[in-house]
Image (cartoon, grey):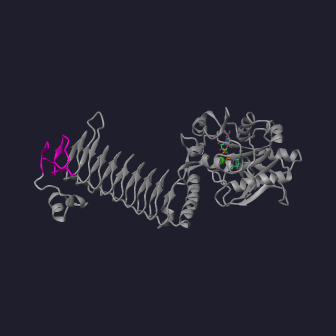
Amino acid sequence: MSQTSESVLPVILAAGLGTRMKSRKPKVLHELCGRPMLAYVLDAARGVSGRRPLVVYSPATAAVAEAFAEGADLAIQAETLGTADAVRAALAVTPEEVCEILVLSGDVPLVGSDLLAELIDMRRARNAAVALVAVHAIEPGGLGRVVRTEDGGQVLRIVESKDATPDELEIEEINAGVYVFDAAWLRSRIGDVKPSPVTGEFYLPELVALARADRRPVVSLEVDDDGTLVGINDRAQLAAAELELRMAINERHMLAGVTMIDPIRTYVDVTVELGQDVVLEPGVVLRGSTRIGEGTRIGAGSQIIDTVIGRDCTILASVLESSKVEDEVQIGPFSHLRARSSIGRKVRVGNFAEVKASRLDAGVQQHHFSYIGDAELGERTNVGAGTITCNYDGVRKHKTKIGKHVFLGSDTMLIAPIELGDEARTGAGSVVTRDVPAGMLALGVPARLRKPRVEVTPAASESVKPSAAEAAERTPR
Ligand code: UD1
Ligand code: CA
């Protein structure tokens, strides 16, 4: 691969709304494995050029400018009159010292830096006016056809499918929409592109015919269709590209020591990090900034978004969002961690439990049908079945603070704001409206405080669960 170069300016065309997507959203903002298409193109460009890429957008794709203003320069194309007109808009803001222009399409997201480096070298070697990527496509569809001399040696021109004769449509070599131009030559000729008599658009590939007319070399880098260079125009092609990328991501993780029971049905965003011996069952969806530690198993159908999970955890059929989970935790089946939940070591959450914006310290047990929101729970506290932090009074959210080794009987309602001290207890069905000091028992509706008949001894408080007999008496486990 050649050195990244300051002389090459990457220009990325992203002014077309992409009508074939049938979407309100600009095409290049549609995502592939969790990142917008355009982000991939920008990465590829950065791999070969030290210059900030220049993105061409239009009033219809203003959202593109907003999303990418930080990492790229912008040029506006007032009206989307075609790809040549888009490049003209780019040249209007291109500094004089730029001697090569790399043109990429925002809708060809899987193009790799290695290929671009090769294309740049190829243009330089022949001092060509244009170097382009030509793909031997299995399904040329609506793409531009590469028309060559009889002997097949020289590229004569590119013909768009809408403008092509039936014979030309038979050609199976297509234009990838990726080019390197001699910048000075491009500046001198961009104004000479005539609109297509069929569509009225100014086609960038017309520059190929103009270079031939000027007797300047046109070179082509010929590649086979591996699914990475066929542009995305509609949602079927979006899904096909996503499949291609997903398989590559999954293979990378499997080769690094991750087990996937069914990789075709495992959906891992490109941004996700996985430790060794992670096991992903079918239908798992891992999104965004999710990171999963060694030896953790993610059960079928789980969805994990922007969440960091420690080592040796088991997550079964659950949804975890924007949360943190420490080591050896068990969650699920059918539990939900909502944003800003923090789960300590060896905690158990689930079946059918919900946690929101709460901290559960090490060893907390929250088993059945319960809701913990805006709360802090101390070490080894036990949350009985059906327990709810009543954190919302209809206007505001309130906090619940629960100490260590607390035992909450089944169906306890904790009316926040409220605090329960260490080793406090509540009876089944209690509605707790006032703070419970350490070691006290709250019973009834509304709950009254009393000293527990049996003092909680240090030995008793050390067991994470009450004895089997106690458990049977007080709470369905
Ligand atoms: C284009 C090529 C075609 C090639 C194909 C590869 C032209 C005329 N045709 O066709 O030869 O086989 O890509 O994928 O270039 N854009 C603008 N401004 C415009 C029009 C388009 O910025 O006025 C942008 C689009 O947002 C898109 C890119 O240019 O990112 C390509 O445009 P698109 O309309 O998708 O061209 P294709 O028909 O796919
Ligand atoms: Ca396209």
Please say whether residue 437 is visible from this viewpoint. yes
Q: Identify which residue, 102 or 154, lies in the foreground.
A: 102
Picture coordinates of residue 455, whole percent (x, y): 14, 55
Is 159 positioned to the left or the right of 19 in the image?
right
Please identify the quadrant where the N terminus is shown: bottom right
Determine whether 476 is above or below 80 in the image: below
Picture coordinates of residue 173, whole percent (x, y): 74, 57
Q: Residue at the front extreme?
A: 458
Q: Identify which residue, 105 or 210, lies in the foreground.
A: 105
Is 307 positioned to the left or the right of 175 in the image?
left
Picture coordinates of residue 260, whole percent (x, y): 48, 66
Principal secondary structure, stretch drawn in magenta: loop
Is 88 positioned to the left or the right of 41 in the image?
right
Please say whether residue 168 is visible from this viewpoint. no
Would you say residue 99 sits in the magenta stretch? Answer: no
Picture coordinates of residue 319, whole percent (x, y): 39, 53
Q: Residue at the right extreme?
A: 215
Q: Identify which residue, 16 or 287, lies in the foreground.
A: 287
Determine whether 372 is above or below 202 in the image: below
Q: Which residues are magenta?
A: 423-451
Please identify the quadrant where the C terminus is shown: bottom left
Is 397 positioned to the left or the right of 38 in the image?
left
Q: Residue at the left extreme?
A: 453
Would you say residue 437 sits in the magenta stretch? Answer: yes
